[in-house]
Amino acid sequence: MRSRREPNLSIPLENLRRDLRTRLESDKQMSGAWAIVPLLPIMVGIVVVVVIFAAIFSAIGSLGPSGTTTTGGSAIAAALVGSIFLLYSLYFVVLILVAVMIFKLVSRRNTHFNRQILLQEDIISMAREMSARKGADVSIFLNNMDRSVKEARLEEVEKNATLWAILIFVSGLGMLYAGYFLMKDFFRHERREDLFINDMLRTFNALGVPINFPYRNPPIPDRSFALYFILTLITGSIFAVYWVYVLVSDPNNHFRQQMLMEDTIMAQLSGTPSPAPIPAPPPS
């Protein structure tokens, strides 16, 4: 006979399932090919220089036996004007690519952070329901988990991805600061999330639902913005290739490990012993 208390757990479980389904939109993997974006201005400069020299050599080749001709000077002038137009056109294209990259990076930061807050709130609701059903006192752990979520709401404030993309056209300082908070925010997010997970594991262990999964390997390191900035300056933006690479790859790795952890949590909680066990959902 089914217990009347069973629906109490089905509601937070369904919320958890919805949280896991939304990660397909919030936790998007980005290609490491975005790392070549910092090299594009250098490539643009090389192309423009090649065009200028080609035009000059062409003009020199058009000189007559006397070494004087008006067409040679006109060709050089046209080449210079064309090169300037080409430079600005290609530079504008590069700015658009940089803006698109920043938009993607900031946007997935926002969506992932927001989803994690909802997920953690639903995990807390699940733990409260189980605690009330079992009559177990896990108030200390629940308080710690609540505090982690409150800190996340205060510190992981959503940033306007469109605004940061537009700032790229105004000043290069916008890109620098975007690189700073994208690097630091994910490090702090992961450390705060690990604290939440530790309290969550102790909570469910006290409720008779041990959850086991490996710790992050590797975790996001605390990278130095000052060091990355200096290395970018002294290498003529070449080091920025690696900087962009870690801005892309760190969240990618975080999302992959997060997916495994969430699936493990969902599988364990779906099989939580109860008067009438709730069947695990089919894989989605």
Image (spheres, rainbow, N blue to C red):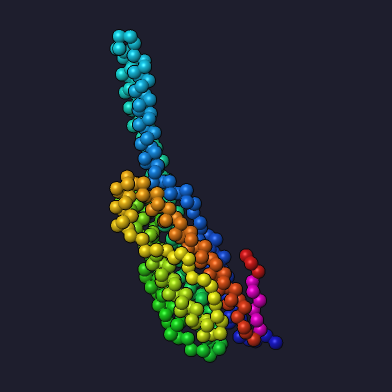
Image location (x, y in percent) of residue 23: 53, 63
Residue 64 vs residue 144, the one in the foreground:
64
Residue lying farthest to the bottom in this orientation: 135
Relative to 30, is 56 above or below? above
- Residue lying at 57% horizontally and 72% vertically, measured from the top left: 264
Q: Can you say which quadrant of the picture contains the C terminus?
A: bottom right
Q: Can you say which quadrant of the picture contains the N terminus?
A: bottom right
Residue 50 in the magenta stretch? The answer is no
Relative to 67, is 265 above or below? below
Direction from residue 141 to residue 177 in the image, left or right: left
Give the quadrant of residue 142: bottom left
Residue 237 appears in the rendering:
yes
- Residue lying at 29% horizontally and 12% vertically, measured from the top left: 68
- Residue lying at 44% horizontally and 71% vertically, measured from the top left: 193
Give the quadrant of residue 8: bottom right
Residue 31 vs residue 170, the one in the foreground:
31
Relative to 1, is 221 above or below? above
Residue lying farthest to the right in this orientation: 1
Image location (x, y in percent) of residue 149: 42, 74
- Residue lying at 33% horizontally and 9% vertically, measured from the top left: 65
Direction from residue 11 to residue 187 in the image, left or right: left
Residue 200 vs residue 65, the one in the foreground:
65
Secondary structure, magenta segment, majority class? loop
Image location (x, y in percent) of residue 171: 31, 48
Highlighted range, magenta: 276-281
Residue 170 appears in the rendering:
no
Image location (x, y in percent) of residue 61: 36, 17
Residue 280 in the magenta stretch? The answer is yes
